[in-house]
Image (cartoon, rainbow, N blue to C red):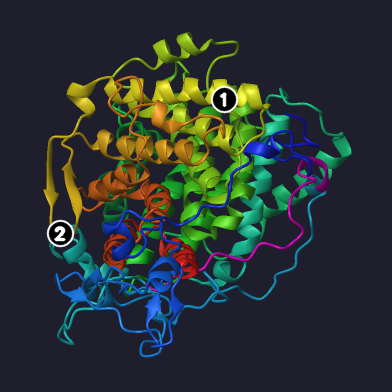
Amino acid sequence: MSLSEPHGTTGLASTRSKISKPEVQRARTGCLTCRRKRRKCDEIKHTSESGDSKCAYCLANGLACEWPGFINVSGQLLKKKSAKQQPRKEPQESPELAKVQWPFSPVASLSDDHPVLSAAPPHHKRVSPLSSLLTPTLPSKVLSPPQFHQPVVEKPNVPAAASPFPDYTSLTGMSSDPLSMDAFNQNYPSTHENSYLDLSHILREYMYVNAFTTNSKLEPLLPKEVLTEYFVNVEKFSVKDFDEPVVLKPEQEILLLKNYVENVGAGMDMFDTDKTMVRVIPQKMKSRPALRFAVLALSSRWFDSKVANYPKGLTVSLYHESLRHLAPTYNDTSNNIYIIVTCVILCVFEMMSSEPRNWKQHLEGCVLLLKSYKITGLAVDKIERATFWVFIRMDVCHSVINESPTILPSEHWVLPNMTAEEIEKAFDTPEMHGNYIVYLASLVVNLVYGEQEDDQYKSKWLDLWVRLRRWELSFEDLFSKTYEVYDPKIGFPRIFFANSQAISSTQMYHMSCILMIQNKPHNLRLSQLSAENSMYPSVSLVYHARRIIGISITNSDYGAYSNSIQPLYVAGLILTSRQDYGILLNALHNVEKSTGWATQWRMNDMMKFWRKGD
């Protein structure tokens, strides 16, 4: 990958224009009269002389035209009124969702021009000389600082004498004694919050500088004068006269560490049977302050989104403290892997805190670090391997969000010159089975969002289609569902997994199948790939979509929740009824409520899509 033409950026001319990804169209069902008579309905409501809405077939034949109604969450049929009597309504969330204290505008008031996240005034800063040299394709628009939203949780009615940190005990199940919530009854200096954008740029450019200097394995080598000019800025940052360093009380640090081990870190260890992020990293951070404060900052970010009266400024202060210790290590080779772990954890922090359109800025820095230190998904070192998979799942999510190839090409995920058979064998263990579906998902997005010749595309599509099915059939004793039942009240299956790794991996499998079906070669008939044939997955979009949602509404694992946002969005584009809309919005809201990962922007995207189909 050359620096002038990063992976995923191509010219306007497409060598595969005939099979470029079509705009996703919403599924239709037609009027009930055409269904009964087995006629093809044009699905357009024409107004007859009597004022009734009829499709073209019913209007031409003088038939009564009935359109399907929708069933709300309570099971009541919602009768459709005539177009003159009933104004067009926005998709409604379920009654349970309506009770939630929303951090954004109400769902029904959203318009197409409603911003997903409020943009802060532009913040101008000196552009590093690295910017034009390393990332010539970066957008010229200055990044907006992340918004620390008000928490989603409802504020309980508590007596005036209650603890100033009342929400925490209900979230963690911990008593306030001996770890009194009074420990957090303070506001930390917020001067860093105003310069958050500067801190974000420091992290990004630190990763670039470290990647191009520590090992010097990347090409081209940067001119010494360019690096020297930037090093001065890094050193100034590390010794600049900031506020006093953050000093946490013992009870504060215990709470943050406990939350990291039980929630945030466990989510990063989603497919890691060794639980590196919660068992190994906390032990290694004792002598590594940059890593320690990165862990504390990420845990604190979780509280920001869930606790109504969490101290303002603490999260950003911890983030700044991590960078203050990280910056002087730009050319330190004594503890390489822990520098990368620190950067990846801070990158997770950035993903939780910034708009999705800004994710690429930090993902690119992590990609350079991984390539510089030659870390792959099959690394022998357990810490290197675990760090790679924590990062790479974010790369796949970014790819789905932007409908673009992964920033790190799939061939760099494995060892050089490995064949498909060798790769499949390397992943053929229970410990790597969850990671293998992430790798297959990367092949899917790079295939459907990339450019291939027609003949190559079809052969690669068929090969990948079979590999997805083989993944589903492997290790069924460990990754298959524990219990499944159809819930007629909501119209979705309830699918429970005892193995937490199977939750997210199965959702990624179904999401990959949806993307494959939507982007199949034009000259390939899916009817020829019988769903009864054990070599192929199901060819039903609805089947895969409903299973993604059924898994989310049944399981509540933190890691699976964190990784479910994009599969739920892909599934949501298949839905056609307002009852389904409400259930999906509830599922996404529960993700944000439980994990702190913002989902409102994805709700907005789906509601805009649904409105286009109304």
* Residue 430 against residue 515 in the figure, above or below: above
- The vertical placement of 131 against 269, above or below, is below
Q: Position of residue 134 (x, y in %)?
A: 77, 41
Compared across the picture, whether 529 is left or right of 377 comes to left
Residue 80 in the image: state x and y as whole percent. Answer: 29, 79
Q: Is residue 249 visible?
A: no
Q: Which circle's residue, 1 or 2, is located before the other in the chain?
A: 2
Determine the CA span between mark 1 and mark 2. Answer: 56 Å
The kind of residue on which mark 2 rests is Met
Q: Which numbered marker is on residue 611?
A: none
Split into 4 quadrants, where in the image is the N terminus? top right
**Residue numbers of the magenta segment:** 132-150
Q: Secondary structure at mark 2?
A: loop
Above or below for 478 versus 58: above
**Residue labelled with disc 2:** 174
Residue 430 image position (x, y, % from top left) = 28, 20
Look at the image and tell me whether residue 569 can be seen.
yes
Residue 137 forms part of the magenta stretch: yes
Q: Residue at x 69, y 34 (%)?
A: 16
Q: Which residue is mark 1?
A: 458
Closer to us: mark 1 or mark 2?
1
